[in-house]
Image: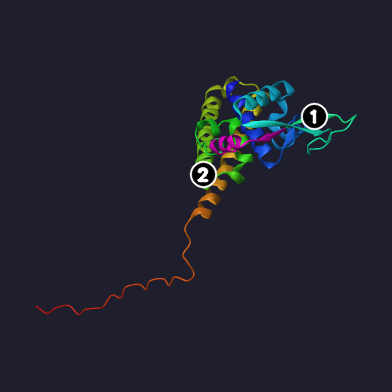
């Protein structure tokens, strides 16, 4: 549960960096941007927000219902809580985005980190992509070993399900390899067009010495 809460925290902070949002907007954005978060309900989101408020990385503001602008005084106006990122929250988000270790490679963490790759430095992006690929390559080997050992005992449908799982993981490995190659090409140093390339050294032909 702690890992899942950390992933949700990263997603919420990333969305709040774009603009302040109230709880319903956050939940809607999580559902549309990060499909894997559809399982998260208000029961998960609001405790996460309260914890971030307690830590000082987000702050509350009030806004008119249906608007992200601060509420104006007036009778009959219903206001709702809007959450925004604090200076400490921006620093915390930057630290989370810079994490490229194993927690960023698993099934939940990778999707969230990848969604915010546009704000992540190139070295961290490459480290996460390579880590994710390594983890999935281990999973491919596990699938193949399992299939070779249990093929004779599986019925047709269970066998097809196992093959489908293997093909899905193999497909993601190929996709990751393409992304890694693209990242490396972008980061490869390019020769400056203003810098003349050094000429190849001339090799003078010498006649053999006579003994």
Q: Which mark is residue 126?
A: 2
Tags 2 and 1 touching, CB below 8 Å: no
Q: Position of residue 184 (x, y in %)?
A: 50, 51
Q: Residue furthest left?
A: 211
Can residue 159 be seen at all in this image of the molecule?
Answer: no
Q: Residue at x 54, y 43 (%)?
A: 125
Q: CA distance from mark 2 to mark 1?
A: 41 Å
Q: Secondary structure at mark 1?
A: strand
Q: Which mark is residue 18?
A: none
Q: Position of residue 187 (x, y in %)?
A: 50, 53
**Which residue is label 1 attached to?**
80
User: In the shown orientation, is residue 96 left or right of residue 196?
Assistant: right
Q: Quadrant of residue 81?
A: top right
The image shows residue 183, relative to residue 146, as above or below, that is below
Q: Position of residue 104 (x, y in %)?
A: 55, 34
Magenta residues span 83-95
Is residue 90 within the magenta segment? Answer: yes
N-term-proximal mark, 2 vs 1: 1
């Amino acid at each position: 549960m702690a890992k899942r809460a950390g992933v949700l925290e990263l997603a919420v902070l990333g969305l709040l960096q774009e603009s302040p949002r109230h709880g319903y907007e956050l939940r809607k954005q999580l559902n549309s941007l990060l499909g894997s978060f559809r399982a998260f309900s208000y029961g998960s989101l609001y405790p996460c927000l309260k914890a971030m408020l307690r830590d000082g990385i987000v702050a509350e503001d009030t806004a008119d219902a249906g608007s992200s602008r601060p509420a104006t005084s007036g009778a009959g106006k219903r206001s709702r809580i809007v959450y925004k990122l604090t200076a400490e929250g921006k620093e915390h988000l930057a630290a989370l985005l810079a994490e490229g270790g194993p927690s960023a490679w698993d099934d939940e963490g990778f999707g969230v980190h990848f969604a915010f790759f546009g704000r992540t430095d190139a070295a961290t992006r490459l480290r996460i992509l390579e880590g994710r690929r390594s983890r999935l390559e281990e999973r491919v080997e596990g699938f193949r070993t399992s299939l070779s050992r249990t093929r004779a005992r599986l019925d047709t449908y269970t066998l097809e399900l196992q093959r489908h799982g293997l093909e899905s993981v193999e497909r993601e490995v190929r996709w990751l390899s393409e992304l890694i190659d693209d990242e490396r090409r972008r980061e490869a140093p390019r020769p400056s067009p203003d810098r003349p390339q050094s000429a190849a050294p001339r090799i003078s032909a010498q006649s053999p010495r006579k003994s």
